Image (spheres, rainbow, N blue to C red):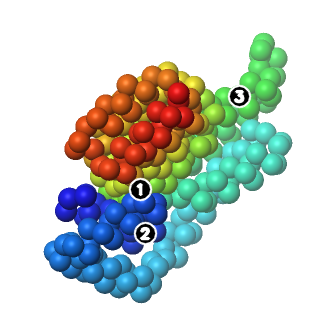
Amino acid sequence: MNCDQAKELVADLMAGHLTEAARAELDSHLADCPSCRQEAANLQAVWAKLALLPEKEPSPALDARFHAMLDAYRQGLKQGSGDVSPRATLADWLARLWPRQPALQFAIAVLLFALGLLLGQSRTRLQRKETVAGTTNEQVLAQLRQEVSNMKQMVMLSLLQQQSASERLRGVECSYQFKDPDEQVLSALLRALDSDPNVNVRLAAVDALQQFARNAHVRKGLLDSLSRQPSPLVQIELINTMVTLKDKESVPVFKALLQDKETNKTVRERAAWGLEQLG
């Protein structure tokens, strides 16, 4: 392990995300490298100070504005459908997903308010034109579900573009809300896997993409990313994923990693294991 690889793994060590093998290799490097050992000690001191910082609470005015917009959205749902359980589930989901950035909060709040008005107007038009052919409650609900799905997608894509790694992680987690995502969502997750500067975000992207591995574009993206990844942790997770998927097309890539002397030792060992599993 060289110094650059060690520096990349130090943050994961503090967060408790290293495997036993990776931690042992990092500890061995730190024992022999005073420079990296000092940098790790400095980072540990910073983490300890950050843990003492109080959690920032939103202002009362911001809280009141959010609840006002959420009430408008709930009113729109009440007028568009008599089903209570979907409304409660969506409200809980929105509360958990609500971002901390004021600009993003305002944008989502405006969309929620507009959606409430749209539903109210739709209900009024339906009452005035009860005889319009083809207009049914099922169609209204289908339109509502599509609008909500579009809103979820917008929130996810916005979170993935935030500067904060924790916000981008939340964006990746949003992908679990989609049963059949479109290409825009899948491409955003693959970009996060390939280019996000935070290792934890890339690891989360690997896990999220596994649920869509039946898509040929996703499977190819996972395999192509394996040889491009600078992080051994992400490479190991990708190897595990391809073995889980029983993807025979991974064999040539595993062999290339095994033969490349520049590849991390732990990654080469995992690639050899993967070849054994795939036969």
Question: In the picture, residue 44 is in which quadrant?
Answer: bottom left
Of the numbered discs 1 and 2, the one sitting upstream in the chain is 2
Tell me the element at label 1.
helix
Disc 1 to disc 2, C-alpha distance:
10 Å
The percent position of residue 250, horizontal first and vertical second, equals: 44, 28
Disc 1 to disc 3, C-alpha distance:
36 Å
Of the numbered discs 3 and 2, the one sitting upstream in the chain is 2
The residue lying at 35 percent from left, 85 percent from top is 49
The residue lying at 39 percent from left, 72 percent from top is 14
Q: Which residue is mark 2?
A: 15
Question: In the picture, residue 146 is in which quadrant?
Answer: top right
The residue lying at 45 percent from left, 77 percent from top is 56
The percent position of residue 108, horizontal first and vertical second, equals: 49, 50
Q: Give yes or no for contact between labels 1 and 2 (Cβ–Cβ under 8 Å).
A: yes
Residue type indicated by callout 3? Ala
Q: Which residue is mark 1?
A: 200
Instruction: State the residue in front, 124 or 64.
Output: 64
